Every structure is written in C-alpha cells, then in structure tokens.
Image (tube, grey):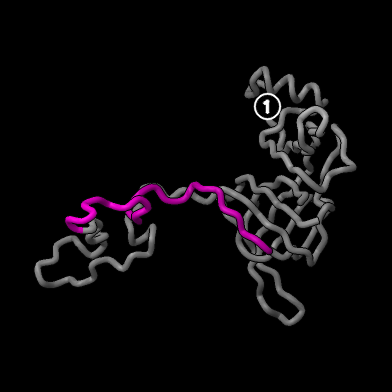
C-alpha cells in the first residue's frame, strides 16, 4: 500500500453529469521528499520515509537536522513511513499527486477534531434520563446508574462514561478520487475526512 502525505484545505462540492451535488474534500497532496529508504539488509524490513511541508531550521533539533542534511532535503514538518509500493524510489526523489488517478478509491487517515471533556449524551449518544417531572432536577443529561449491584460490586472496564472526546487517529476508507490537479498538487475526494483545516492527513492507495 503506497501513499502520500497531505494537508486538508477544506470542503466544497461538485456537480456530476446528472446534476447531483456531491460534497467533497480538497487536500493538498505533496510533493513529498524521500528522506530514507529502509532495506532488509540494514533494517530488517523494507520501508520508505517521506517528508512533507517545509519547516524552519531554527525549530529543528540537531538529530533531525542531521537526518535532513544527510538526505539533502530542507527540514520537513511531517514524516511518515510507507512499507510498500515505492520499490523504484531512492533518497532525494519526490512523490507527487500524480500517484493517484481519478476514479480510484483511497483511505484517508487524520486526527479528529478535539471536543474537550464531554458528557455521555454528546460523547456516546445517550438519551439521558428524559423525564422532566417527578422530582427531576438537572438530571436530563445524566448517565444514570453505572454499578452492577452487590455482585460484582464494581464498575466494569470499558463502561461508557463522560470524558475527553475527539483528538484521536481516525481512518475513513474507500473515498473516491474525483479530481487530480497536478499543477497545484490538489486532490479532491468524495465525502469528508477527519481533522480540522490545515491539519495533516495520510492518503493511502491499494496497489
């Protein structure tokens, strides 16, 4: 499975030949520089490290600065390693958006928007206690009982409760590629992808 690193630009919509409005996401996909090639002889496996989005040198540590210098590349903000699909690449090459073609399907991985600490109604779609009469007071969005009585006298692990919501790695599979703009390195995929605007995403294709 090969792929590329990108940045979510935002959402828009396109019309198909039948006049149907299709929601889609615009992604700046690449160009990505090949920074390192893993081999079975040296590393025990095959892998290709890609870097995306230039970063200021003053914000890079010495170890990473040496890594970028060895690869002959400017410092990159996002590094991702792919394990298949780049057998022909070597250090210094570039991976561009022309890796994809219109009509194929891709998987997009990103970090979902953080929602902060949320209750069970928003986090787990609980219905709440609902009844507003019979002595209810500020209980409409409460989780209700969480215990299991005198036996086993404890709360089971995995109980759905209030807590921090979002901010996790999410992968959306089988998104159709609607457009590929090689001049501006833009990829337009059908539907929504996880993350906020200008957040990094990883687009993978099945070889």
Question: x, y (%) of residue 18?
Answer: 73, 82
Quadrant holding the C terminus: bottom right
Which residue carries the number 1 mark? 56
Residue 87, by quadrant, is: top right
Question: x, y (%) of residue 74?
Answer: 76, 28
Q: Is residue 67 left or right of residue 113?
A: right
Q: Count every numbered label the image shows and give the total.
A: 1
- Which portion, as a residue range, is magenta? 149-174
Residue drawn at x 82%, y 60% as measured from the top left: 101
Which residue occupies the foreground of this view, 76 or 67?
67
Characterize the local packing of mark 1: few (<14), some (14-19) or many (20 or more) Cα atoms within 10 angstroms: few
Residue drawn at x 35%, y 50% as measured from the top left: 157
- Check disc 1 and report its element: helix, strand or loop: loop
Looking at the picture, does residue 81 appear above or below residue 191? Answer: above
Residue 39, by quadrant, is: top right
Q: Please, which residue is most extreme toward the top here?
A: 62
Question: x, y (%) of residue 102?
Answer: 81, 64
Q: Please, which residue is most extreme toward the right here?
A: 88
Question: x, y (%) of residue 20?
Answer: 68, 79
Residue drawn at x 17%, y 71% as measured from the top left: 132
Q: Main secondary structure of the magenta part?
A: loop
């Amino acid at each position: 499975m090969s792929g590329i690193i990108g940045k979510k630009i935002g959402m828009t919509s396109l019309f198909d030949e039948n006049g149907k409005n299709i929601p889609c996401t615009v992604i700046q996909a690449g160009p990505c520089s090949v920074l390192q090639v893993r081999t079975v002889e040296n590393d025990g496996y095959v892998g290709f490290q890609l870097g995306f989005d230039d970063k200021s040198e003053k914000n890079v540590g010495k170890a990473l600065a040496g890594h970028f210098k060895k690869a002959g590349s400017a410092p990159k903000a996002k590094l991702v390693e792919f394990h298949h699909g780049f057998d022909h690449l070597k250090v210094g090459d570039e991976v561009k958006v022309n890796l994809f073609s219109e009509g194929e399907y891709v998987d997009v991985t990103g970090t979902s928007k953080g929602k902060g600490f949320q209750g069970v109604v928003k986090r787990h779609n609980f219905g709440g206690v609902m009844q507003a009469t019979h002595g209810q007071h500020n209980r409409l969005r409460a989780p209700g009982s969480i215990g299991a009585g005198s036996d086993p006298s404890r709360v089971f692990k995995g109980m759905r409760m209030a807590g921090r919501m979002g901010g996790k790695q999410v992968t959306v599979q089988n998104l159709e590629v609607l457009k590929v703009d090689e001049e501006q390195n833009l990829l337009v995929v059908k539907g929504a992808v996880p993350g906020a605007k200008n957040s990094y995403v990883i687009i993978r294709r099945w070889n």
